[in-house]
Amino acid sequence: TDRYCVFGNPISHSKSPAIHAAFAAQTGEVMEYTAIAAPLDDFTGAWRRFTAEGGRGSNVTVPFKEEAFRLCDTLSQRAQRAGAVNTLVLGKNGLTYGDTTDGIGLVRDLARHGVNLAGARILVLGAGGAVRGVLEPLLAAGPLSVRIANRTAAKAAALAQDFTDLGEVHGGGFDAVSGPFDLVINGTSASLAGDLPPLPDDLFAIGATAYDMMYGAEPTVFLRWAEARGARTVDGLGMLVEQAAESFFQWRGKRPDTEPVLAELRRSL
Ligand code: ATR
């Protein structure tokens, strides 16, 4: 049986094993997919051991995405830009290939929700790894404009600078934000602390969508705030399933139907 896994630390609450088991059942692929807690100081060793024992590929989550990036022999272009990988593939030649499927997952989930990206005015909150990982696929869906706003303004400005060759993208602090926007994506980890970035009330254009990369049984603080201001709200559960589907495709060459898997996952929250 071909073996796959997700590496993280902690990892016990990961939904990836259930998602990939559903994909495998649906497509008739015979494979095993487990969750492995890699040691914080030796992700590379964990990946080498896994492949030595027959592992063919893995997902990578917090806090190993950058170390996974560094161990790769070859990288997709979007992974090079992101400086992080969430998908490892062991090639037939024994070399490790890395990709990041988070951005394509976000773009596919937005499409599934009928969000029109062509010409959209987009605000992205946050300038950490999660945001860096999605910018290239987002800008590729354009022409569109992206404003990145972050607590640490200089980080947003520097991040925007790294992507200006791909489209219209600017960065700064929250105080520099002025709407309206057609799409506001929360890529900060502020929700985890129950915090809300300081944002103006007139942020949303008519018909705008608020998207939180986080998800949970209850709407995040950001989504509750956005709903009260008239935006349509979407959480990141669909992005999770779509990034998994793209990883699955890279390993198995088959595209699972994400809809029933997402519906089941939603019920289980
Ligand atoms: P991730 O991999 O989730 O992106 P990260 O790289 O540590 O993690 O980035 C976290 C992001 O959330 C950053 O943009 C951070 O803002 P700073 O760059 O100013 O630190 C943002 N963030 C975290 N907690 C926040 C809070 N309470 N309010 C606003 N922004 C917050």
Image (tube, rainbow, N blue to C red):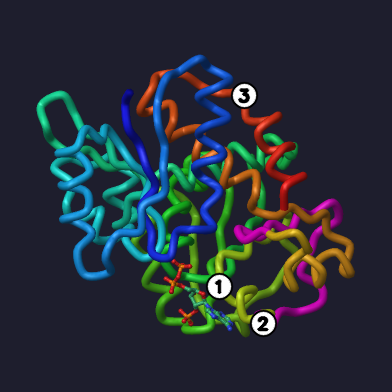
Q: Where is residue 93 in the image (x, y as percent from the top left)?
A: 10, 26
Answer whether residue 211 is magenta in the image: yes
- Placement of 253 over or under 80, stated as above or below: above
How far apart are labels 1 and 3 at the CA level? 29 Å
Earlier sequence position, callout 1 versus callout 3: 1
Disc 2 vs disc 3: which is toward the camera?
3
Q: Does the residue labelled 1 lie within 8 Å of ligand 1?
A: yes
- Placement of 52 over or under 202, stated as above or below: above
How far apart are labels 2 and 1 at the CA level? 9 Å
Question: Residue beneath label 1, please?
Answer: 189
Earlier sequence position, callout 2 versus callout 3: 2
Question: Residue beneath label 3, please?
Answer: 257
Disc 1 vs disc 3: which is toward the camera?
3
- In the displayed structure, does residue 109 sit left or right of residue 158? right
Earlier sequence position, callout 2 versus callout 1: 1
Crowding at mark 3 (Cα within 10 Å: few <14, some 14-19, many 20+): some
Secondary structure beneath label 3: loop
Crowding at mark 1 (Cα within 10 Å: few <14, some 14-19, many 20+): some
- Asked if the residue under mark 3 is in contact with the one under mark 1, i.e. CB atoms within 8 Å, the reply is no
Q: Which dot marks residue 195?
A: 2
Q: Which residue is painted at 69% across and 30% down in the image?
A: 259
Q: Which residue is painted at 56% across and 46% down in the image?
A: 240
Q: Position of residue 117 (x, y in %)?
A: 64, 42
Which amino acid type is marked by label 2?
Asp
Which amino acid type is marked by label 1?
Ser
> Which segment is the magenta one?
197-215
Q: Nearer the viewer, residue 40 or 147?
A: 40
* Residue 20 in view, yes or no: yes
Q: Which residue is painted at 50% across and 34% down in the image?
A: 20
